[in-house]
Amino acid sequence: MPKATKSLGIGRLLIAVYGVFAVSSSARAIYQLAREFDQAPLAYSLSALAAVVYILATIALARPSLRTLAFIAVSFELVGVIAVGVLSYLQPELFAHPSVWSKFGQGYGFVPLVLPFLGLLWLRKQSAK
């Protein structure tokens, strides 16, 4: 199999995972904001922010003309996952209800922590071509 085809397949898988996270985190955030916002406003607002980031990253990764936006979105995601992850351990009272990024994405099998590294790696490989 040619290298370009293999890379395209990996890219499609990455975009599909981002798409799943865009949909799932958006649904979760909409529900939380509409029904439970008063219980954990910070955590639920961060879930909504994560949803927006996943939507932007999905769209930008899928369009070669938006590589700069993809890099910004995925980099922001990485910083967000790390910052929220650390904060959720240092100030657990702020995260009585989990967000997508709390505890480094523990509720999602730590995929939110791994995903931006894979996204940045894939973007780097694509820009090297």
Image: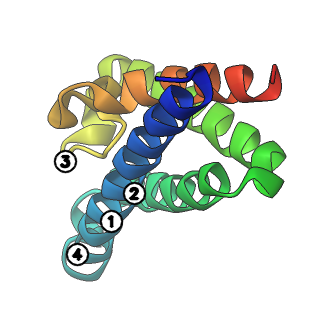
Which residue is most to the bottom?
A: 34
> What amino acid type should be assigned to the residue bearing mark 4?
Tyr
* Residue identified by numbered label 3: 97
Dot 4 or dot 1, earlier in sequence:
1
* Residue identified by numbered label 2: 19
For the residues labelled 2 and 1, say whether their Cβ atoms are less than 8 Å apart: yes
Q: Nearer the viewer, residue 32 or 13?
A: 13
| Label 4 element class | helix
Residue 72 placement, left or right of 104: right
For the residues labelled 3 and 1, say whether their Cβ atoms are less than 8 Å apart: no
| Label 2 element class | helix
Dot 2 or dot 4, earlier in sequence:
2
Q: Residue at x 26, y 61 (%)?
A: 24
Q: Is residue 83 visible?
A: no
Q: Nearer the viewer, residue 41 or 6?
A: 6
> What amino acid type should be assigned to the residue bearing mark 1?
Val
Dot 3 or dot 1, earlier in sequence:
1
What crowding class fits label 2: few (fewer than 14 Cα within 10 Å), some (14-19), or many (20 or more)? some
Please state the horizontal and vertical placement of residue 52, each as a whole percent of the image: 53, 62
Q: Please identify, in this view, whether the residue under mark 2 or under mark 4 is nearer the observer.
A: 2
Q: Please tell me the numbered disc located at residue 23.
A: 1
